[in-house]
Image: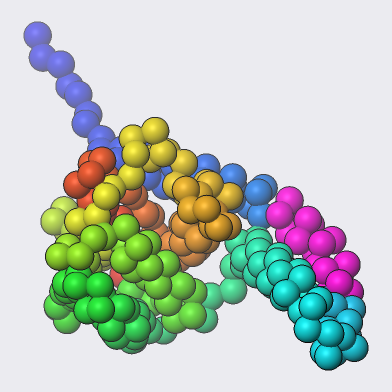
Amino acid sequence: MFHLGIVKDVTEQKRLAQQLIISERLAVVGELVAGVAHEVRNPLFGITTTLSALARRLADRKAVQPFLDVVMTEVSRLNYLMEQLLEHSRPVRLDTDDSALRVVIAEVAEEFRGQAEKKGIKLTVEYPEEVGYPRVDRRKMHGVFANLFENALQHTARGGEIRLASSREANGSSQVQIQVSDTGAGIAVENLNKVFDPFFTTRPNGVGLGLAIVRKTIHDHGGSIALRSDGGRGTTFTIKLPLGS
């Protein structure tokens, strides 16, 4: 007796389904966040302008200046938070270019190279031309890699290494894989599933929106981002972006 069977690779279907679920979750969170941010920005603007006027009136009152400075600093933090919230919730408007990613990686590497050298950290970028460059929004993708490099630099000790490497996927798909890895302290196991969540942070003064915006940007480009970290042995972020999009 013979049995006829059909084997179907559903890997791509699973990936697309997972991406759709994440996109829907981001849309719901984004709508809520946008409403809150807009409601807060109006009174915050009033507070900022009033404080500026008060600071000018009391410019000669040295005793009150430290208190005004503290309030202005905290208001600035709130303004920054609102900008981050709006960035996370804005509708997708991508201005893509097929040369943007090459420029972005070169710019970000140059921006952080000085800081890395000062800290005694080796910064390596490997992106062969033959890998190809996906079409991306230069401004948004600059934020992605600046955030990843900043995190890596903050958590990597002197003598360590930060490395960006790229390749085409081995299975012949039309995707580029970019990995940003470091030899830093790594991420605690209990936090691995939280790092992309809005407002999750382990920094004392952190906002917790950086990696949430990174993930949103990558998904807006039709890609995916994953994280691998062995506690105490460094962290690797793996980004996959489609070619020809």
Residue 37 belongs to the span the image colors magenta = yes
State the residue at coordinates (31%, 38%).
10
Q: Position of residue 148 (x, y in %)?
A: 37, 64
Residue 50 placement, left or right of 205: right
Residue 241 belongs to the span the image colors magenta = no
Specify the quadrant of the image occupied by residue 41. Answer: bottom right
Is 167 rendered above or below residue 63? above
175 or 101: nearer the eye? 101
State the residue at coordinates (34%, 50%).
226
- In which quadrant will I find the C terminus? bottom left
State the residue at coordinates (17%, 81%).
129
Which segment is the magenta one? 31-47
- In which quadrant will I find the N terminus? top left
135 or 182: nearer the eye? 182
In this picture the colour scheme is: rainbow
Q: Position of residue 11 (x, y in %)?
A: 29, 41
Specify the quadrant of the image occupied by residue 9. Answer: top left
Residue 84 placement, left or right of 121: right
